[in-house]
C-alpha cells in the first residue's frame, strides 16, 4: 500500500514538474517572439578625462559646432572600395559619421583635416560585437590606384 502511494506521489510530482517546464518554455518563446525585430537604441556617451576643453562633442550637435567658432574642414569624403555593408535608417549617415569623427580629431588631437582624403567604411556589427559602426582611413595625399 505504501509503495502505491509513493509511486502515485512520484508520478504526480514528475507530471507537475513537466507541465510547469512546458508552460515556462512556451511563455518564454511567446515573449521572445513578441520582441523579435524590435530595434533597441542604447544612448552612449564618452568622456575624456581632463579639462572641459577635451570633452568629446555629441554626434547630435551638428550645426551647433559652427556657432562655437569651429569651422568645418574641407576634406574629400568617399566610400571605401572595400565597403560591403549598408547603413540602416537608425544609423548615422556617412557624412554625419565623418563630421563627428573630424570634430573628435580636432578636439582631442588638434588635427586639421583641410585637404585630406577620408575613406569611410560601414560595419553592421557581428555576433560578438553587435553594434554597427563607421570606420575611416584618412590620407593627406591622393591614393594611387595600381
Image (spheres, rainbow, N blue to C red):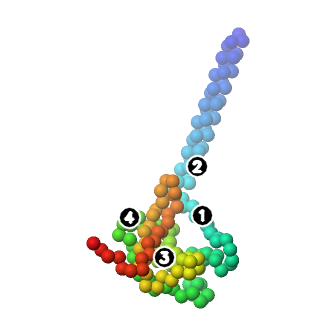
Is residue 28 at least partly visible in the picture? Answer: yes
Residue at x 69% of width, y 77% of height: 51
Q: Position of residue 86 (x, y in %)?
A: 42, 66
How far separated are the C-alphas under marks 2 and 3? Answer: 39 Å
Instruction: Determine which residue is flagged by label 4.
Output: 84
Give the number of the mark in front: 2 or 4.
4
Q: Where is residue 35 in the image (x, y as percent from the top left)?
A: 56, 54
Q: Quarter holding the N terminus? A: top right
Mark 3 crowdedness (10 Å alpha carbons): few <14, some 14-19, many ≥20: many
Instruction: Determine which residue is flagged by label 1.
Output: 42
- Which mark is first along the chain, 4 or 2? 2
Instruction: Determine which residue is flagged by label 3.
Output: 98
**Residues tagged 2 and 3 counted as in contact (Cβ below 8 A):** no
Give the number of the mark in front: 4 or 1.
4
Mark 1 crowdedness (10 Å alpha carbons): few <14, some 14-19, many ≥20: few
Q: Is mark 2 on a helix, strand or loop?
A: helix
Residue 9 left/right relative to 127? right
- Which mark is first along the chain, 2 or 1? 2
**Residue 28 higher or lower than 139, as above or below:** above
Amino acid at each position: 500500500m505504501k509503495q502505491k502511494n509513493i509511486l502515485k506521489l512520484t508520478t504526480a510530482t514528475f507530471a507537475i514538474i513537466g507541465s510547469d517546464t512546458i508552460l515556462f518554455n512556451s511563455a518564454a518563446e511567446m515573449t521572445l517572439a513578441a520582441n523579435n525585430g524590435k530595434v533597441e537604441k542604447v544612448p552612449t556617451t564618452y568622456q575624456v578625462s581632463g579639462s572641459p576643453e577635451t570633452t568629446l562633442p555629441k554626434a547630435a550637435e551638428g550645426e551647433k559646432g559652427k556657432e562655437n567658432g569651429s569651422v568645418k574642414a574641407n576634406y574629400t569624403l568617399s566610400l571605401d572600395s572595400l565597403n560591403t555593408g549598408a547603413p540602416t535608417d537608425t544609423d548615422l549617415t556617412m557624412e554625419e559619421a565623418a563630421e563627428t569623427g573630424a570634430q573628435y580629431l580636432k578636439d582631442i588631437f588638434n588635427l586639421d583635416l583641410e585637404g585630406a582624403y577620408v575613406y569611410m567604411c560601414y560595419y553592421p556589427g557581428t555576433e560578438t560585437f553587435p553594434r554597427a559602426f563607421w570606420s575611416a582611413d584618412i590620407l593627406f595625399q591622393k591614393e594611387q590606384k595600381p
